[in-house]
Image (cartoon, rainbow, N blue to C red):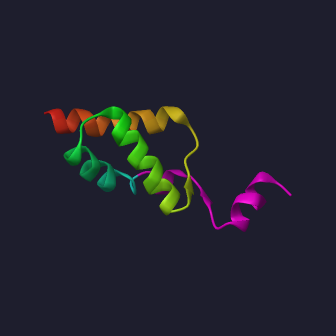
Amino acid sequence: MTMRGKYALFGYRSWSSSLYSQPEQPAAHIVHRDCNPRFVVTELIIWLNEHKIIWRGYTRFQELVSRVLSEERQ
């Protein structure tokens, strides 16, 4: 069984560029509660698990967290 098949078996979707904007709104709400980067990352991972999304690529995840933290600080 391929890795994609294994994930699909449990209903998970692989991250794609079409899903990139979906975590933006929850990330903004998370940052309103707490600006600690560790908290934001943990809560986003929980959100991704709840929506069964496998986020590939640490860099894009880091960019999202950095962006929402910067916007909140401004």
**Magenta span includes 8:** yes
Total number of numbered labels? 0
Q: Quadrant of the N terminus?
A: bottom right
Q: Identify which residue, 12 or 38, lies in the foreground.
A: 38
The quarter of the rendered structure image containing the C terminus is top left
In the image, 55: left or right of 27? right
Q: Please, is residue 71 above or below residue 27 in the view?
A: above
Residue 20 falls left or right of residue 66: right
State which quadrant residue 64 falls in. Answer: top left
Determine whether, in the image, residue 60 is placed left or right of residue 36. right
Name the residue: 28% across, 40% down: 68
Task: Give percent across and percent down for residue 21.
Answer: 39, 53
Residue 20 x, y percent position in the rendering:
44, 51
Q: Residue furthest left?
A: 74
Name the residue at 20% across, 37% down.
Answer: 71
Q: What's the residue at 76%, 59% (across, down)? A: 6
State the image coordinates of residue 19 (x, y, percent, origin top left).
47, 56
Is residue 31 on the magenta stretch? no
Q: Would residue 66 be visible to someone looking at this image? A: no
Identify the residue at image location x=34%, y=41%: 40
Residue segment shown in magenta: 1-20
* Residue 39 visible in rendering: yes
